[in-house]
Image: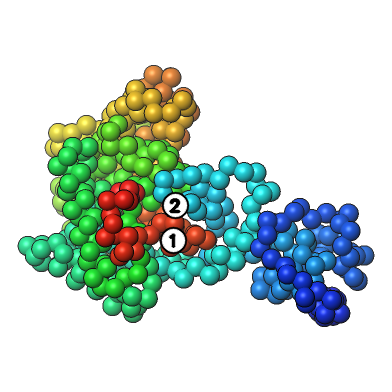
């Protein structure tokens, strides 16, 4: 194999002089390479094209790109999309997510899906652009806690209190935000002026009223002002629900975000929250679900030291029953060891905890169940007739740590089929959080690694001053 690679460079050096004066653009959209190509590959002509591609893979992306520059004969082969898809497979993100963002999100907001055939995409160009993307600081504001990290990393590097609850809550929002972001930059050991930032924002002020729009605008402006005053070069701020949808490789659908205090059912079309259709809000969130498990444990004389212990048990032992009534007659006992506190055994608490989402009354909460909130949202989407095809709202993406409870997606799908007429329920698909509790952070990371980032998504300080001209994905 070493001799074959040596022949590649010998072949290139023999031809380099004759092509040194040629003007070759290595990132032109590539034709599909076939063995019938009239260009000669020298000693490699005797090998099948697939074998030659395997050899070029070993050379690596940098040297592969050089091959297309120094020798015209190699250019069609080296520009082959199969080669660069292979290199992208070994990049920061999964191939599926790379393909999704580069064909759906590269043009920025509003979303414009790439409609040309796949053969017209140059993945050599895309790879080269992604390598040059500077990377971004990713901050998922969250509704319970914040996650932060670097866009080139696989997952968040740290967590803190959300900026809505950071510091002295009686202080002005601007001061709290500056303190919050300064703390994040300090923990990441990054200068604020060195990199763009992608901020995911918790859903708040849900209505489409003038006062709600003003409140959202005020919070958004305060975040941008705080960051630009810290010399951040460019800012991208998008709500959590939209980012969770991107993480699931969708631009349209309904996101069920089980937040810290409440659960939001958010219809999104082409990346835009359809507030005119209506965002349904259910008065049960992760805190109530965890609190209900704590109450059950206290009634059963199960002693624990902190709410963190209860949270750990919820994450490791609890689930949602497909049939609540039938589950009451089953043996569901299971145990889990919490580090530092020992073993805990739960039985019916395991599935009663998650049942609060469907029957809030068992926890003393007067509110509609999750299935009713989602069905109401879907009914509104159907009645609005925003598109000719109703399929856009039949994909339901779950988001948030509590949404990771096993069985939740299947139970919700079953309940929706029972509540909705076939004209609406046919084709429903409920998707569990694709990246667990980190789904919104991953969605922001995908944007931060886009080949067109930061230009297509971010706002600079100069642009922010002309903010009346911009419609941001809020």
Q: Is mark 2 on a helix, strand or loop?
A: loop
Q: Is residue 104 left or right of residue 221?
A: right
Q: Is residue 399 depicted above or below 198 in this figure?
A: above
- Residue 12 visible from this viewpoint: no
Q: Is residue 454 depicted above or below 334 in this figure?
A: below
| Quadrant of residue 165 within the rendered picture | bottom left
User: Residue 295, how many percent across, how many down?
Assistant: 16, 48
The numbered disc on residue 455 is 1
Is 235 in front, or is 326? 235
Residue at x 36% of width, y 42% of height: 272
| Quadrant of residue 54 within the rendered picture | bottom right
Residue at x 28% of width, y 54% of height: 467
Residue at x 80% of width, y 71% of height: 71
Is 277 in front, or is 240? 277
User: Residue 39, how many percent across, how many down?
Assistant: 87, 62
The numbered disc on residue 25 is none
Q: How far apart are marks 1 and 2 (CA)?
A: 8 Å
Q: Mark 2 points at which residue?
A: 108
Residues marked 1 and 2 touching at CB (< 8 Å): yes
Q: In this view, does 100 lie to the left or right of 117?
A: left
- Other residues around mark 2 within 10 Å, as few (<14) / some (14–19) / many (≥20): some
Q: Which of the marked residues, 1 or 2, is nearer the chain's N terminus?
A: 2
Is 239 in front, or is 307? 239
User: Residue 350, how many percent across, how many down?
Assistant: 30, 45
User: Residue 134, how many percent across, how many down?
Assistant: 46, 71
């Amino acid at each position: 194999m070493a001799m074959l690679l040596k022949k590649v460079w010998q072949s290139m050096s023999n031809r380099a002089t004759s092509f040194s004066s040629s003007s070759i653009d290595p990132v032109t959209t590539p034709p599909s390479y076939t063995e019938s190509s009239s260009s000669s590959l020298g000693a490699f002509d005797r090998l099948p094209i697939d074998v030659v591609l395997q050899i070029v893979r070993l050379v690596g992306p940098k040297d592969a790109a050089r091959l297309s520059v120094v020798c015209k004969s190699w250019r069609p082969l080296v520009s082959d999309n199969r080669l660069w898809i292979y290199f992208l497979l070994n990049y920061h993100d999964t191939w599926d997510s790379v393909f999704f963002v580069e064909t759906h999100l590269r043009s920025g907001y509003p979303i414009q899906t790439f409609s040309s055939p796949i053969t017209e995409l140059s993945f050599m160009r895309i790879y080269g652009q992604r390598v040059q993307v500077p990377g971004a600081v990713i901050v998922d504001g969250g509704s319970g806690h914040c996650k932060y990290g670097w866009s080139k990393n696989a997952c968040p590097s740290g967590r803190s209190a959300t900026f809505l609850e950071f510091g002295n809550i009686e202080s002005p929002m601007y001061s709290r935000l500056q303190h919050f972001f300064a703390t994040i930059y300090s923990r990441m050991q990054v200068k604020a002026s060195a990199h763009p930032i992608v901020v995911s924002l918790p859903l708040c002020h849900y209505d489409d009223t003038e006062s709600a729009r003003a409140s959202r605008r005020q919070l958004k402006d305060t975040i941008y002002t705080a960051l630009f005053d810290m010399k951040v070069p460019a800012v991208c701020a998008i709500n959590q629900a939209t980012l969770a949808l991107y993480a699931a490789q969708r631009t349209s659908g309904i996101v069920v975000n089980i937040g810290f205090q409440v659960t939001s059912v958010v219809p999104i079309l082409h990346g835009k929250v359809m507030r005119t259709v209506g965002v349904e809000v259910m008065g049960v969130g992760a805190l109530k679900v965890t609190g209900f498990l704590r109450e059950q444990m206290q009634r059963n004389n199960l002693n624990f030291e902190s709410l963190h212990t209860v949270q750990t048990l919820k994450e490791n032992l609890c689930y949602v029953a497909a049939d609540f009534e039938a589950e009451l007659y089953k043996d569901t006992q299971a145990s889990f060891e919490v580090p530092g506190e020992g073993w805990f055994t739960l039985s019916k608490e395991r599935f009663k905890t998650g049942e609060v989402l469907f029957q809030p009354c068992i926890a003393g909460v007067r509110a509609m169940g999750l299935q009713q909130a989602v069905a109401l949202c879907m009914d509104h989407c159907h009645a609005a007739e925003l598109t000719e095809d109703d399929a856009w709202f039949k994909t339901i993406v779950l988001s948030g740590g509590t949404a990771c409870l096993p069985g939740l997606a299947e139970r919700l799908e079953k309940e929706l089929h029972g509540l909705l007429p076939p004209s609406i329920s046919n084709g429903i698909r409920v998707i569990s959080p694709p990246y667990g509790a980190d789904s919104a952070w991953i969605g922001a990371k995908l944007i931060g690694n886009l080949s067109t980032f930061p230009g297509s998504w971010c706002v600079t300080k100069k642009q922010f001053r002309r903010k009346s001209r911009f419609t941001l994905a809020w």
